[in-house]
C-alpha cells in the first residue's frame, strides 16, 4: 500500500491552437510534492508562457495552454 506522502505530481503542459485544432506534444514541467503545488505552478507557468509568446502570436494563432497534474510514485 503506497502512502500518500510518497505520491508526487508531474506537471504536464502543452500549447494548443484553437485555429488549427491541434496541440504541440506535452512536456514535463516538473515534479511537485502536492496537487496544490502542481496546480499553482501550472497556473503560474501558463501565464508566464503566454507573456513570453506575446499577444501578437497568441491572437494570430489563437493559442492557449493546457496543463494537468499526473500522480506518480517516481522520485
Image (cartoon, helix red, strand yellow):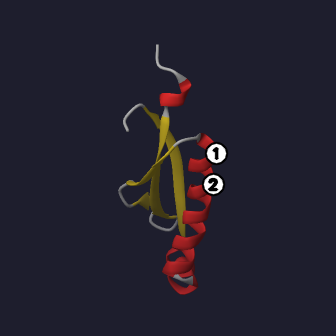
Residue 51, horizontal then vertical, whole percent: 57, 78
Count of picture labels: 2
**Is 70 left or right of 27, judged from the image as shown?**
right
**Is 5 left or right of 14, judged from the image as shown?**
right
Residue 34, horizontal then vertical, whole percent: 58, 41
What is the crowding at mark 2: few (fewer than 14 residues within 10 Å), some, or many (at least 20)?
few
Q: Secondary structure at mark 1?
A: helix
Q: Nearer the viewer, residue 8 or 20?
A: 8
Gap in Å between the C-alphas at discs 2 and 1? 6 Å
Q: Is residue 21 visible?
A: no
Quarter holding the C terminus? top left
- Residue extending farthest to the top is 1
Residue sitting at 41 percent across and 31 percent down? 73
Q: Nearer the viewer, residue 61 or 33?
A: 33
Q: Is residue 28 above or below residue 19?
A: above
Residue 62, horizontal then vertical, whole percent: 55, 72
Q: Nearer the viewer, residue 75 or 40?
A: 75
Q: Nearer the viewer, residue 27 or 29?
A: 29
Residue sitting at 60 percent across and 64 percent down? 44
Q: Is residue 26 above or below residue 56?
A: above
| Quarter of the figure with residue 4 | top right
In the rendered structure, are the residues bearing label 2 and label 1 in contact, judged by CB atoms less than 8 Å apart?
A: yes
Residue 60, horizontal then vertical, whole percent: 52, 81
Residue sitting at 54 percent across and 83 percent down? 54
What is the crowding at mark 1: few (fewer than 14 residues within 10 Å), some, or many (at least 20)?
few
Q: Is residue 29 visible?
A: yes
Check disc 2 and report the residue beneath it: 40
Residue 24, disc: none
Residue sitting at 52 percent across and 47 percent down? 68
Q: Secondary structure at mark 2?
A: helix
Residue 36, disc: 1
Amino acid at each position: 500500500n503506497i502512502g500518500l506522502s510518497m505520491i508526487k505530481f508531474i506537471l504536464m503542459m502543452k500549447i494548443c491552437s484553437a485555429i488549427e485544432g491541434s496541440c504541440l506534444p506535452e512536456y514535463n514541467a516538473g515534479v511537485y510534492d502536492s496537487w496544490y503545488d502542481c496546480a499553482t505552478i501550472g497556473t503560474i507557468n501558463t501565464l508566464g508562457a503566454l507573456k513570453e509568446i506575446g499577444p501578437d502570436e497568441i491572437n494570430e494563432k489563437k493559442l492557449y495552454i493546457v496543463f494537468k497534474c499526473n500522480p506518480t510514485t517516481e522520485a
